[in-house]
Amino acid sequence: MLDWFASFGGWAWIVLGLVLIGGETLAPGVFLLWLGLAALLTGAVVGLTGIAWQGAWLVFAAFAVASVLVGRIATRRKAEEPDAAHGLNDRGRQLIGRVFKLEATMTGGEGRIRVGDSSWRVTGPELLAGSEVRVVRVEGATLIVEKA
């Protein structure tokens, strides 16, 4: 089997790379993309140097590890962007720094504010209804506020 694969030279690696990249559309995640890129690069190296199949597999292994590591770094940086840190699924963090009016007088350090069509539980200093408060941090589903 390996002799048959090796008989195609660099083209076998290029076809394998294209199949892996195409397989990415069928499988969740981004893992096959990096292996496909490694196979394409291996095809280029085999095509240019004509190394034996054993060397080609070692080159592929090295490119696969390198491309997966580069891919992880690239996707990690994207996840650390400010919009991702304050993403759609973390609405409370989006409210930090914003000013709202209390719906009712805070009693026992607790009250509620209206944000759009939802009502949020807040904790902070004792303030009268209608007072403006600024959200300073989030603890679970509770907003911590201070007088604005």
Image: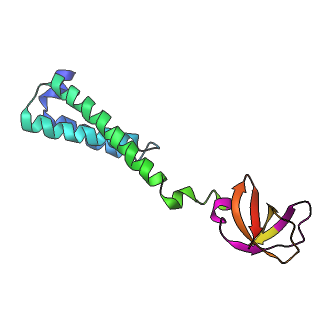
Quadrant of the snapshot with the N terminus: top left
- Write the residue at 42% across / 51% down: 77
- Write the residue at 8% across / 38% down: 48
Residue 145 lies left or right of residue 49; in this view the side is right
Residue found at the far bottom of this picture: 130
The magenta-colored residue range is 92-112
Quarter of the image for residue 21 reads top left
Would residue 42 be seen by someone viewing this image from the given angle?
Answer: yes
Would residue 23 be seen by someone viewing this image from the given angle?
Answer: no
Residue 38 in picture, x, y percent from top left: 26, 38
Q: Is residue 82 depicted above or below 101 in this figure?
A: above
Q: Is residue 97 magenta?
A: yes
- Nearest the eye: 70 or 112: 112
Q: Is residue 148 depicted above or below 57 in this figure?
A: below
Residue 132 lies left or right of residue 34; in this view the side is right
Residue 95 in picture, x, y percent from top left: 67, 66
